[in-house]
Image (tube, helix red, strand yellow):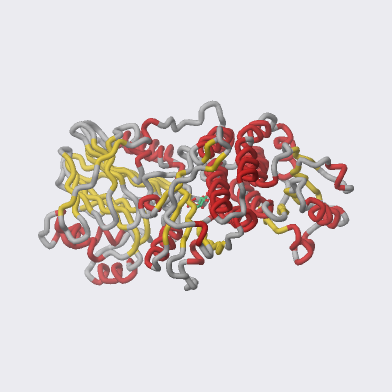
């Protein structure tokens, strides 16, 4: 979602701001802008669409200021036009903002009644006018911002620069993350450490409610009440991590291919392979005495949670309450005191997941999370974090983070099964062995993508695609449909195969591709019956399975062969074919694979 950068440098800053914004491109955006202060005067350039449009504007009309802010906008209030792009400005101040100002309507009315003239449809512009009003009333920028922050409701991160101040930037964090970077006589801010990686690896994170005054000399941080506070400076790992596509055409392709390695790392961190044992860290609750576990997440992470529900219930006999985070937070769930809640998130910043976590904490739940970004809000607010070791995921459509989440969840499910007396030594060794073989099976699958390229031609012509799966393959069908619609814009739906007759069968004709996720497990024959129902109506079956297509007894339009794996680990391995189907279809159709339209990587608004 929106990305914020800011810098006080020694030399024209606009180019550096654009470079930093490029590192935030992965979050998804639809317009961008920068503003600098040059000899005390504010200047701004903005553009619709990609950063190259902004670069062209800067080339035609450069900004020479050495203090500046930049922004990539993912539209919430108002269309993605240049006029709505950030920074928003008055003569006195320029501001960039991530998040939503919930009370902007009241504030806007108040400001307009006071004579303010608005030039955009955004909620952000009220901030500029509020600060400007305070400055015109004679307050200095620090006081003006302090008064303004008190008026703002919602979750946001802000950065501002001021007319007449060449060495000043004020930033604030209320719900959306903000990192401060320390250079040599230079200072930086960014929505995450990744944005700052080219400039510095010395990073401090603001806490919720913090606001900070930056000059080239350093930073003074204050908390919500105005009290001066210190936030620890840490060395960020982001700089050490190479964020490029390597030999791949897209980040998504690179990330799909990294899975054998990163899933291997994640598994290795949670088990002792030599001893065939699971080794998870000491948990904030005891699986043995737990009555139930509640799991919440959004998007792909939610589907990881759905796989986990099958695992925990089947192998540990532990009842799972699974919720989409945005539903959980408002459904007034009956939460048992002393219970436990598990949150799954790649970014660790998803607004709904974070709000649900806080709600559960308030209700006295012990909180465990599975998170990919170690320094994220969800990680910091959990009793225990089980990190996924996927590395930075840049493609908006989640791939390696999903399989690493599954790897961590599988290990937790085994730990739960052991603690609850349902998994003995022998079964533990069998399941650990099965997990240990997953990276190899993934690598085998990735060896030959030609069947996926061939299938892409057919799928690209489809208007709708149906994905079917039973049991643990049902969440993979849902994830497959999500991946396809996210990046190819083809309408796709995932269904439990047994539900076929209760609706979707009405859609089936010779134009309807039906992708069936069917490992040869104890449910295979049931799924074959559903395939026959599809075949009888001339549906185009694409079989994703280790089984021989002939064994289905029906006409199969295409078969995607998957190695035979232990049924426990099938979701990890079958995730790859559905990713590859979506990826190759999108590439064939020429869509923007890494930054699909309207989507954001890190969804920091409700
Ligand atoms: C967005 C992303 C998805 C992701 C979801 C949850 O919708 O585009 O790929 O699954 O958010 O994000 P999280 O960071 O919490 O896993």
Q: Is residue 148 above or below residue 391?
A: below
Q: Can residue 132 be seen in this view?
A: yes
Q: Is residue 247 above or below residue 104?
A: above
Say which of 287 and 503 sits in front. 287
- Drawn side of residue 25 relative to residue 553, left or right: left
Which residue occupies 77% across, 53% down? Answer: 523
What percent of the width, then of the height, locates residue 283? Answer: 44, 52
Q: Is residue 147 above or below residue 382?
A: below
Say which of 316 and 143 sits in front. 316
Say which of 343 and 44 sits in front. 343
- Drawn side of residue 97 relative to residue 40, left or right: right
Which residue occupies 28% across, 68% down? Answer: 107
Q: Can residue 251 be seen in this view?
A: no
Q: In this view, does 71 lie above or below 156?
A: above
Question: In which quadrant is the C terminus drawn?
Answer: bottom left
Which residue occupies 55% across, 26% down? Answer: 247
Answer with the quarter of the image where residue 366 lies. Answer: bottom left
What percent of the width, then of the height, locates residue 319? Answer: 58, 63
- Drawn side of residue 439 relative to residue 559, left or right: left
Which residue occupies 60% across, 36% down? Answer: 436
């Amino acid at each position: 979602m929106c990305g914020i950068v800011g810098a006080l440098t020694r030399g024209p800053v606009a180019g550096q701001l654009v470079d930093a914004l490029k590192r935030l491109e992965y979050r998804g955006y639809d317009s961008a802008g920068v503003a600098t202060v040059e000899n005390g005067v504010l200047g701004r350039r903005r553009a619709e669409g990609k950063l190259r449009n902004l670069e062209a504007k800067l080339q035609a009309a450069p900004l020479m200021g050495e203090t500046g802010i930049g922004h990539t906008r993912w539209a919430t209030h108002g269309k993605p036009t240049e006029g709505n792009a950030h920074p928003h400005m008055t003569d006195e101040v320029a501001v960039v903002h991530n998040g939503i100002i919930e009370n902007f309507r009241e504030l806007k009315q108040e400001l307009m009644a006071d004579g303010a003239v608005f030039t955009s449809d955004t909620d952000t512009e009220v901030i500029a006018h509020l600060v400007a009003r305070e400055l015109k009333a004679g307050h200095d920028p620090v006081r003006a911002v302090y008064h303004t922050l008190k008026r703002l409701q919602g979750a946001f991160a802000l950065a501002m620069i001021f007319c007449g101040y060449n060495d000043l930037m004020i930033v604030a964090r209320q719900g959306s993350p903000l990192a401060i970077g320390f250079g040599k006589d230079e200072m930086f801010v960014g929505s995450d450490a990744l944005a700052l990686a080219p400039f510095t690896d010395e990073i401090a994170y603001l806490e919720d409610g913090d606001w900070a005054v930056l000059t080239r000399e350093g930073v003074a941080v204050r908390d919500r009440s105005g009290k001066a506070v210190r936030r620890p400076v840490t060395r960020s790992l982001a700089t050490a991590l190479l964020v490029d596509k390597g030999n791949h055409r897209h980040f998504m392709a690179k990330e799909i291919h990294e899975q054998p390695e990163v899933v291997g790392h994640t598994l290795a961190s949670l088990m002792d392979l030599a001893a065939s044992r699971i080794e998870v860290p000491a948990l904030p609750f005891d699986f043995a005495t737990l009555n139930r576990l509640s799991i919440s997440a959004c998007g792909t992470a939610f589907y990881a949670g759905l796989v986990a529900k099958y695992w925990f219930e089947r192998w540990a006999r532990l009842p799972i309450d699974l919720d989409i985070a945005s539903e959980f937070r408002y459904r007034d769930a009956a939460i048992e005191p002393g219970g436990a809640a598990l949150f799954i998130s790649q970014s660790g910043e998803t607004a709904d997941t974070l709000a649900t976590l806080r709600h559960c904490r308030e209700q006295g739940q012990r909180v465990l999370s599975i998170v990919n970004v170690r320094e994220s809000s969800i990680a910091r607010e959990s009793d225990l974090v089980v990190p996924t070791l996927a590395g930075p995921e840049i493609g908006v459509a989640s791939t390696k983070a999903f399989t690493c989440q599954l790897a961590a969840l599988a290990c937790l499910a085994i730990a739960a099964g052991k603690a609850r007396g349902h998994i003995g030594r022998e079964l533990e060794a069998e399941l650990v062995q099965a997990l240990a073989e997953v990276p190899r099976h993934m690598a085998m699958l990735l060896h030959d993508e030609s069947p996926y390229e061939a299938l892409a031609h057919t799928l690209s012509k489809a208007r709708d695609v149906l994905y079917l799966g039973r049991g643990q393959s049902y969440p993979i069908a849902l994830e497959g449909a999500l991946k396809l619609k996210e990046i190819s814009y083809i309408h796709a739906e995932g269904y439990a195969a047994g539900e076929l007759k209760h609706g979707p069968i009405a859609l089936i004709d010779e134009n309807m591709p039906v992708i069936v996720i069917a490992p040869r497990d104890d449910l295979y024959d049931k799924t074959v019956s559903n395939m026959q129902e599809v075949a009888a109506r001339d549906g185009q079956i694409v079989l994703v399975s280790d089984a021989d297509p002939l064994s289905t007894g029906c006409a199969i339009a295409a078969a995607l062969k998957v190695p035979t794996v232990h049924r426990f680990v099938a979701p990890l391995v079958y995730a790859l074919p559905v990713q590859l189907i979506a990826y190759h279809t999108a590439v064939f159709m020429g869509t923007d694979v890494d930054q699909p339209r309207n989507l954001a990587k890190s969804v920091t608004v409700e």
